[in-house]
């Protein structure tokens, strides 16, 4: 029964964020479901410790994407 409920429950997807200083140097990482407050956080593909105290590679940034349709929105259509 738990398996059935887990199929229909909403799961939050955790995403990776990097905090950049004013020169574009990676200062810290954060892994959370909601985007952190502030303009100095950017979404990244993964948290790679070798990026700390170095410029963030362009390939690490996640490009802005269209918002996905949720199950609740599908049911309301």
Image (cartoon, rainbow, N blue to C red):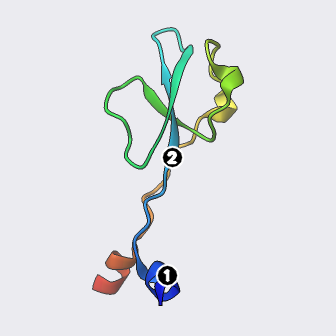
- State whether residue 77 appears in this view: no
Residue at 56% across, 13% down: 25
**Which one is in front in this view, the residue at disc 2 or the one at disc 1?**
1
- Secondary structure of residue under mark 1: helix
Residue that badge 2 annotates = 15
Q: Is residue 27 above or below residue 35?
A: above
Q: With 17 as the anchor, is 72 left or right in this view?
A: left
Q: Quadrant of residue 9?
A: bottom left
Q: Which residue shows up at 61% across the image and 12% down it?
A: 53
Residue 15: x %, y % from top left: 51, 46
**Tag 1 residue:** 7
Q: Which class describes the residues within 10 Å of circle 1: few (<14), some (14-19), or many (20+)?
A: few
**Residue 61 visible in rendering:** yes
Graded by Cα atoms within 10 Å as few (under 14), some (14 to 19) or many (20 or more), the crowding at tag 2 reads some
Indicate the position of residue 26 as horizontal and vertical percent values: 56, 18
Looking at this rendering, what residue extends furthest in the front direction? 1
Relative height, residue 62 to residue 65 (above, below): above
């Amino acid at each position: 029964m738990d398996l059935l409920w887990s199929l229909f429950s909403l799961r939050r997807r955790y995403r990776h964020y990097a905090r950049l200083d004013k020169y574009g140097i990676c200062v810290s990482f954060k892994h959370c479901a909601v985007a952190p407050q502030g303009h100095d956080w950017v979404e990244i593909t993964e948290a790679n410790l070798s990026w700390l105290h170095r410029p963030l590679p362009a390939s690490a940034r996640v490009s802005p994407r269209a918002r996905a349709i949720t199950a609740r929105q599908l049911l309301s259509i």
